Amino acid sequence: MKKIILIPDSFKGTITAGQFCTISEKVLKTYFPECEVISLPLADGGEGTTDCFLQMKGYQKVNTTAMNAFMEEIPVYYAVNGTTAVMEMAMCASLPSAKGRENPATTTTYGVGQLVRHAVENGAKKVILGLGGSCTNDAGAGMAAALGVKFFDEKGEEFIPTGQTLDRIASFDTAEAVKLLADVELLAMCDIDNPLYGINGAAYIFAPQKGADAPMVEMLDNKLQHIAHLAEKQTGINYYDLKGAGAAGGMGFGVCAFLGGSLQPGVNLILDTIDFDTQIQGADLVITGEGRIDSQSLSGKAVIGISRRAKEKNVPVIAVVGSAQDGYQAGYDQGLTAVFTTNTEPVPFEQAAKNAHRNLEQTVDNIARLITALEG
């Protein structure tokens, strides 16, 4: 082994992508001390996305302040490499930050827009925004307002919409935001296909976990329908059926409809941003991982997205996962070489979490022992 790439996603609630890399590299170096081990921890766009990029070569931390989902000023940060800025909406509007006062009808993404504005005003020409883990349902209107989009009610008065006031919007003006973002590429990382509204939309699928009861879910969905059709009337474009429009309380919709941005699968966007095709050159092996691999992983989650890229370079891929459910085997046709599970016996999640680091270490140790035997 001369070169190994470590590029895992996190194991939700047990092991971060960074911890995976640290543990795995320590084990691999024991068996292959001369091997170049490159760590590229990933995230899915939610909490931890920025930190993953900050662990990569060339990215620097930028500190600033912004409003949280309750319009309270908080310290925030994002990652910058040259003119590329990477940030996560969860920095300003995460579900955990709303614990005890969850209310998707009144929370706002305004602070997310402030974060984007800070990056742009400080020279960013490409902004990558992770969508996920939000406590909001405002269709990204708060974010848009912070970036200069003006929302007016029937009296012509300007206001900042929230989930419960989206139907107050009679018109909106994007001129200031268009000017601000004229030379900026705004890309949102999105790995879900949900439309903006309807039974599979932002409110019905995601608002209940943000604190909405059944009547509120129906109300929020009606408000989303209003802004969806208003935006179509003003722009002539149907953004609400766009795959991913319902991501992060409708922020997928807002990125496109209000700001002219675009949505891209998270893993592909990250792999392009970190120049994975160059990083993998000369590699003997790629080790990736995630908490669970199953049939849904085939839709383009981290493990399969990485496997597809590695297959193009004829580099084998090992996935280390917490659990493997039937259906993942189709990934073998897409570049996945082998799957190893870390849990040695069926135990409750709480117990598995306690042993997660040790189990990962033992699993990677077994992989290294197998490679050593085959090489010998």
Image (tube, helix red, strand yellow):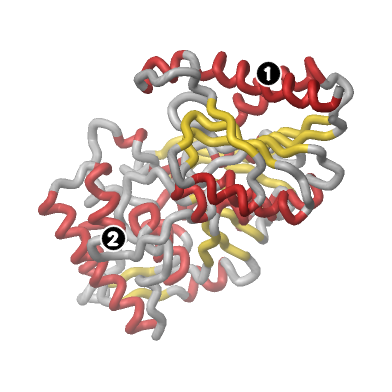
Q: In percent of the image, x 29 and y 77: which residue is there?
A: 229
Q: Measure how far apart labels 2 and 1 are at the Cα level.
A: 43 Å
Q: Position of residue 227 (x, y in %)?
A: 29, 71
Question: Mark 2 Cα within 10 Å, few/some/many (few <14, many 20+)?
Answer: some
Q: Earlier in the sequence, mark 2 or mark 1?
A: 2
The answer to whether residue 262 is visible is yes
Q: In percent of the image, x 24 and y 65: which residue is there?
A: 198
> Which disc is residue 302 wearing?
none
The one of 360 and 218 positioned closer to us in this rendering: 360
Q: Which SS class for mark 2? A: loop
| Residue that numbered label 1 is attached to | 365
Q: Horizontally, is 281 left or right of 128 in the view? A: right
Q: Position of residue 66 (x, y in %)?
A: 46, 44
The one of 37 and 150 positioned closer to us in this rendering: 37
Q: Quadrant of the C terminus?
A: top right
Q: Nearer the viewer, mark 2 or mark 1?
A: 1
- Looking at the image, the residue that sits furthest to the left is 215
Name the amino acid type tagged 2.
Answer: Asn
Q: Which SS class for mark 1? A: helix
Name the amino acid type tagged 1.
Answer: Asp
Q: Position of residue 64 (x, y in %)?
A: 55, 40
* Position of 132 relative to 157 (above/below): above
The one of 353 and 342 positioned closer to us in this rendering: 342
Q: Position of residue 283 (x, y in %)?
A: 82, 41
The one of 348 and 108 positioned closer to us in this rendering: 348
Q: Horizontally, is 193 left or right of 137 in the view? A: right
| Residue that numbered label 2 is attached to | 200
